[in-house]
Amino acid sequence: MKYKKIQNEVKASLKKSRFQHTMGVVKTAVQLAEIYGCDRKKAKYAALLHDCAKHLPDPDKIEMCRKNNLPVSQAEMENPSLLHAKCGAILARETYGIEDEDILHAITVHTTGVPDMSFLDQIIFVADYIEPGRDSAPHLDELWKMALTDLDRTTWRILEDTVSYLSENHASHMDPTTVAACQFYREKYAERRHTDHQDEASVKSN
């Protein structure tokens, strides 16, 4: 299915505000894809479809996952809105004809994140959080600037903010995958800083 037709169908299925958010994610994802040398077309399609299952009632999301033999965690049972990512990937394949596994995976993990994400995964994850229509999440201006130069650090900071917010407000909604992803990127960034400092010290000693 061509992009414009998918766009029209997604627009018809979502609330106006959700579609506006979606198009903000598309714009941001394409911008990040250009910066980091990721496939722009994949970023565009993944961004367009990342929230395509948002309109589904929660019981339908649970049933869709079960029919497709996808595990539903305790956090997802208590907060079925988290399942819109997994269901979005199902709809992307079955309704919109997307067969590219990179696109489908990016849609699947865009809410919780996972350890060791691909560039495309990170781009959709980050774009979803910082797109221009967002105005309530913390540190947005800082994250916007950071995203233009350091995708790993931005991913880590978003995960840190997410874990912190959920810990304080909705602990039961915390998906273990988000905690694991946060730990992975915290350690990855710390290791990178350590290596950079070693390199700087070596240069100075020479």
Image: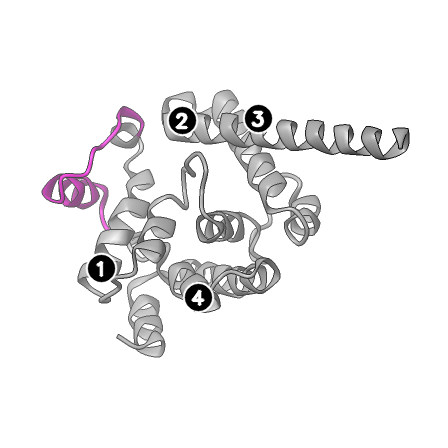
Task: Please tell me which residue is depicted at 57% across the width and 26% down the height of the picture.
Answer: 187
Q: Quadrant of the C terminus?
A: top right
Mark 1 to mark 4 CA distance (whole Å): 15 Å
- Which residue type carries mark 2? Met
- Which residue type carries mark 1? Arg
Task: Judge depth for marks 4 and 2 and give the one in front.
Answer: 4
Q: Which residues are magenta?
A: 56-75
Mark 4 to mark 2 CA distance (whole Å): 28 Å
Circle on res. 44: 4
Image height check: is 195 above or below 31? above
Residue of label 2: 174
Image height check: is 98 above or below 172? below
Image height check: is 156 above or below 143? above
Task: Judge depth for marks 4 and 3 and give the one in front.
Answer: 3
Density class for disc 1 (Cα within 10 Å; few <14, some 14-19, many ≥20) is: some
Query: Which callout, 1 or 4, points at the residue further toward the start of the chain?
Result: 4
* Secondary structure mostly taken by the magenta-highlighted segment of the chain: helix
Dot 3 falls on a residue whose secondary structure is helix
Circle on res. 187: 3
